[in-house]
Image: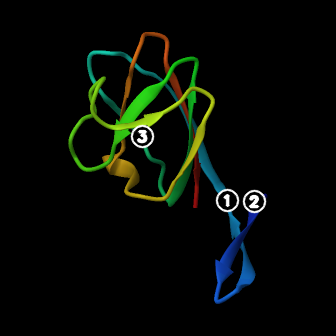
Amino acid sequence: MSGNTLQKAQGGRFLEAVSFNKGYQQISLNTSSASSLTVPDGAEYALIQAEAQNIRWRDDGTAPTSSVGMQLLSGAILIYTGQLLQFQAIALTSGAILNVSYYG
């Protein structure tokens, strides 16, 4: 099994923690309705990247719109440690892709 070694700060020192890839997902987003993640078992956080176009996302149980939600710019990577099952995203313009790598 291969894992990624992360360093986490605790009490002024760094601790190493090993996390394992739990899966990958690519979602073609549209501008009319939000998409949710399909979270694999054991996933605790995700690296989320907007590709080709900017997107908006929310994780409070309400779907984002083209004008409401947190914006993620194309090419940016979000280290998301919140409630994965609540995450929803929508494209601001057509052609947006969401790349998601899950870890746990």
Image-quadrant location for residue 69: top left
Q: Residue at x 42, y 21 (%)?
A: 29
Q: Nearer the viewer, mark 2 or mark 3?
A: 2
Q: Nearer the viewer, mark 1 or mark 2?
A: 2
Q: Is residue 26 above or below residue 30?
A: below
Residue plotted at (27% across, 33% down): 68
Q: CA distance from mark 2 to mark 3?
A: 22 Å
Please report contact status of discs 1 and 2: CB closer than 8 Å, yes or no. Answer: yes
Residue 38, numbered label: 3
Three-letter code for the amino acid on which mark 1 is drawn? Phe
Callout 3 crowding tier (Cα within 10 Å): few <14, some 14–19, many ≥20: some
Which residue position holds label 2? 4
- Sequence-wise first label, 1 or 2: 2
Q: Residue at label 1?
A: 20
The disc placed on residue 97 is: none
Q: Is residue 77 above or below residue 93?
A: below
Q: Viewer-proximal residue, 83 or 3?
A: 83
